[in-house]
Amino acid sequence: MIKTTKVDHIFNSALETGLRSVCILAADNSMKYDLQQLIAFDHLVVHTGDINDAPPSLHPNVHKRNGELLVRRSLVERGLLLMESKKLVKKIVSIDGFYYSTTELAIVFIESLTNDYNSELYKRSCWAVKKYKDSGDCFFVEIFNTAFDRWTNEFQLAEISMGYSK
């Protein structure tokens, strides 16, 4: 008889979100971002298809996925802690708050990952960072307003299908 053990899943793990954060930070290593910005980037790099004139989404456009935004904070925090422990990311403490940036090992690490998923993730990270640098925080406001509009519609549709609407 084969004994099974609990398997750690890579999806929505510290490893997956940490890898995304490293790619985002390495896309322009002159930049530093706070946690809220990295959460926004984390959502964006896997759902680029939500934006006009953007690369296709890296992850499937699963119906009713906008609730992801609510749980993403702890996932990104755990990923950053993991990548910081591996010396790929560093935390910068300033009078304005906490920021994250890459170390010199980050780009070497990213270049060592040769599968298509990681290559596409890095391309989308570069695209997202460029868009952010062109537009600033207005870029994130537009993305999250669109996501929350969809999320509100999803809740309204769910209420109607369950008979809660007037």
Image (cartoon, rainbow, N blue to C red):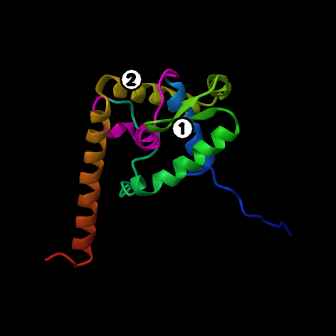
In the current view of this chain or complex, which residue is farthest to the left?
166
- The residue type indicated by label 2 comes to Lys
**Which residue, given by chain and number where applicable, does mark 2 sit on?**
130
The residue wearing badge 1 is 20
Q: Element under label 1?
A: helix
Residue extending farthest front: 95
The dot on residue 162 is: none
- 50 and 79: which one is in front? 79
How much space separates mark 1 and mark 2, taking CA atoms?
A: 16 Å
Is disc 2 surrounded by few (<14), some (14 to 19) or many (20+) residues within 10 Å? some
Q: Is residue 120 left or right of residue 149?
A: right
Estimate the x, y position of residue 112 in percent, counting from the top left.
68, 25
Q: Amino acid at mark 1?
A: Arg
Question: Relative to 81, does residue 54 appear above or below in the rendering?
Answer: above
Q: Quadrant of the C terminus?
A: bottom left
Disc 1, disc 2: CB below 8 Å?
A: no
Residue 61 lies within the magenta run: no
Q: Residue at 64% x, 39% y: name it.
A: 83
Q: Residues within 10 Å of mark 1 (few under 14, many from 20)?
A: many
Q: Is residue 80 above or below residue 136?
A: below
Image x and y of residue 88, in percent: 65, 32
Quadrant of the image containing the N terminus: bottom right
Q: Nearer the viewer, residue 75 or 2?
A: 75
Q: Which residues are magenta?
A: 28-53
Q: Which residue appears at 34% of the width and 30% of the height? A: 54
Mark 1 or mark 2: name the one nearer the start of the chain. Answer: 1
Write down the quadrant of residue 143 in the picture: top left
Which residue is at a point 30% across and 45% down the rendered structure image? 144
Secondary structure of the residue carrying tag 2 is helix
Q: Nearer the viewer, residue 80 or 1?
A: 80
Residue in the picture at 83% in, 67% down:
3
